[in-house]
Image (cartoon, grey):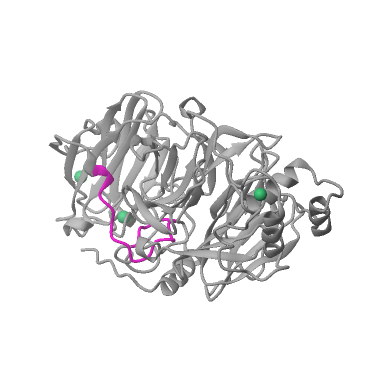
Amino acid sequence: MTTPHRAGVLLAVAVILGALWALPATGAAQIPKPRKQGGRVPAGYPAGPRPLRVGRPRPPSAAGRSTALATITETEPNDAPATATSAALGDVASGNIDPAGDVDYYAFDVTAPTYLILDVDADRSGSPLDPILSLYAPDGTTELAFSDDYAGYYDSHIEYSISTTGRYYAAIAGYGGSGGSGFFYSLQFTSRPAGPGDPTTLFATGLDGPLGSTAGPAGELYVTDINSLRLLKVSPAGAVTTLVAFSNVVPIHVVPDGFGNLLVTVEDPAFTYGAVYRVTPTGQLSTFATGLYVAAAITAGPDGDVWVLDVGRQKVYRYSPFGVLNDSVDVAATGVDAVDAGLAFSPAGVLHMSNSNDRVYKIDGGAPQLVISGALYLESIAFDRDGYLYVANGYLGTVQLYSPTYELVSDPFAGSNLGGPTSLVFGRDGAGAMTSRLLATNYGYNLQAPYVGSIVEMNPAGIRAPGSRIGIDAVDVAITAAAAHLLGGAQVAPEAQHFLDVQGNNNGRYDVGDFRAYLRSKGQLPTAAGVAARTERP
Ligand SMILES: [Ca+2]
Ligand SMILES: [Ca+2]
Ligand SMILES: [Ca+2]
Ligand SMILES: [Ca+2]
């Protein structure tokens, strides 16, 4: 029923932002609730706070993973927990919301830990019913989760991580008390196993529209907020403050520059141009790069170079740490087309990119090469120190773990309290060293408060190694000092020599070839053929 219509990227992204700012507030609600405003959910548009997807096909049903489903039928009266129809995980219950105002309760036992999935099929099978669905705790009254519409239909869908064994209740009703003859539905009770990173725990909440995230050198996090147009700073204790309030651009993604500053990709609200801003620790802005179309993911390599994905032009641009454009890679063949695509270097120094759809590529030899095919929609990617790769699926609300040879290790690695777009970030300690804390920022698609606009932390017991360092500690060496070193004058510090070498020919020592590359990197020499390949002779 859903027809994917691949509009141009510019249009899609403009619509995305338009839809973004038009979204109603979300959160739990009691049955019944007032009539909703506006018309039908657009086909293919996942309902809820997931505006970064427009005109997408519906992904495979999360409920479709179960097998051997048994069919049961509701038994009226079942309008209260005490008279609930009994069900079990693996059942599909058939019922009717009839007459108007009918509520159908189901009771089912769950052994913790279980990742529970409740899926209603009514609208998409032609029923006039617009269902709403609640999950209640064993007391029968505490609402744990609520869903109205999901994945482009009026149908409801709840995924919830059960951490306490007990008898739970699901209640289905018609929106606004609607119902009557022919208002049929089926309600599927399924589950999937908890992953080693489950349960996730709340680290910070109250972020309006988090999209991108990165860890700073003192253990703090930086998060772009595409709703309030802010760059947020999150303390190691989870306290959220504003570092920058932008007035005329949307901050998209963020990475440290190695000099103690941050680099933020930004877009004008109409998505007619993109840029990269440099942000000092006190929030002062300057321009790092301009001339981008739709600036999205950004990361830094082991030589300090800065890589920026432009999803408008479908290119990945490579800049020196000082903002000189040196190179680009065409990634049109990957089909990348959304700003929640991820970009990350493996510890071996190979750039990887998710295409914001169902694939991950490595960018090696100047071209993207497919390494992972997964379920829609793959977003942020993060490597650990050993080259294991965590991949966020913000649509399914899961994180997968892959081995350094791209074999699926854990699916899900985590699946609780996650909802897209989801950005993965390894923490750093107060001295800047990478830690084994893996955090995820949630925009909040298909989540309930307080997880909408949150940061959650994966279960530390499930994390196998510290994260891979993003970028390096760069050194802004004075050109006169860099020259004097080579002329037998004062020697620059060892870390500066290392930086100059990796920015140059990377032969393990600072030499005149590195100096030429450094001049180009600072815009003091014209670019020349071969420079991007780092072939300056010593
Ligand atoms: Ca009924
Ligand atoms: Ca009933
Ligand atoms: Ca509904
Ligand atoms: Ca060298």
User: Which is nearer the eye, 186 or 56?
Assistant: 56
User: Which is nearer the eye, 197 or 110?
Assistant: 197
Write the residue at 29% across / 30% down: 82
Based on the picture, tell me whether residue 503 belongs to the magenta stretch: no
Q: How many marks?
A: 0
Q: Which quadrant holds residue 85?
A: top left
Quarter of the image with the N terminus in it: bottom left
Write the residue at 28% across / 51% down: 101
User: Which is nearer the eye, 270 or 276?
Assistant: 276
> Percent position (x, y) of residue 162?
38, 31
Q: Is residue 506 visible in the rendered structure shown here?
A: yes
130 lies above or below 215: below
Left/right placement of residue 48 relative to residue 235 reads: left
User: Which is nearer the eye, 509 or 43?
Assistant: 509
Left/right placement of residue 396 relative to residue 481 reads: left
> Percent position (x, y) of residue 516?
69, 61
Chief secondary structure of the magenta portion = loop
> Percent position (x, y) of residue 91?
18, 35
> Percent position (x, y) of residue 233?
67, 48
The magenta segment: 45-63
Q: Is residue 355 visible in the rendered structure shown here?
A: no
501 lies above or below 41: above
